Image (spheres, rainbow, N blue to C red):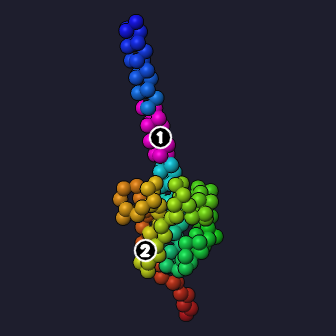
Amino acid sequence: MARRTWRRFAIGVVVAVVVFGWIVYYTDHEIFLIRHHLISHVYRLGTVIQGFTSEFGSNLGPDYKHAIRQLYEYEGAAAANDSIDWSMFLANRDPWGNRFVFIVRPDHVVFGSMGENGRDDGGKGDDIYVTIEIRQQPATTLSGN
């Protein structure tokens, strides 16, 4: 009788460990996929910001809402529109429900997510940021002889 109880206990422990391991793996894998999705979209939007700022400098709207709308309507973004999840950016919510970080300076733009913990860790930890230097193209002038 004691052997049956021991076997049942051992089988129960093995099943619990396997189920727990699967849950941990699945959860970590799911977080990895969410982060990978967000990283790819942040970097794609970074290329749009780079194109916009090379043409217009740091003339992005006065706040996040206006700046994202400008980028969404920017003609240079047309090629990237199919590969960017604009709904996430237009709603100003990352996959964890936090607002995006969007800082415009005269010489650079910082854009990204504070990650799952919702805290700004200065670009470390689970933060996902991209910094775009603003290199405005010189205006071309036509001269006639």
Which label's residue is closer to the chain start, 2 or 1?
1
Can residue 47 be seen in this snapshot?
no
Q: Position of residue 141 (x, y in %)?
A: 53, 87
Label 2, residues with CA under 10 Å away: few <14, some 14-19, many ≥20: some
Provide residue 130's location: percent of width, then percent of height. 43, 63
Q: Is residue 133 visible?
A: yes
Q: Given the image, on which type of amino acid does mark 1 rest?
A: Thr
Residue at image point 48% right, 82% down: 138
At 41% from the left and 58% from the top, the residue drawn is 127
Name the mark on residue 16.
none
Residue labelled with disc 1: 27
Name the main secondary structure of what is drawn in magenta: helix
Between circles 2 and 1, the one closer to the viewer is 1
- Residue 89 coordinates in the image, percent (x, y): 57, 63
User: Is residue 60 within the magenta segment?
Assistant: no
- Farthest residue to the bottom: give it: 145
Q: Which residue is mark 2?
A: 108
Q: CA distance from mark 2 to mark 1?
A: 36 Å
Secondary element under disc 2, as helix, strand or loop, is strand
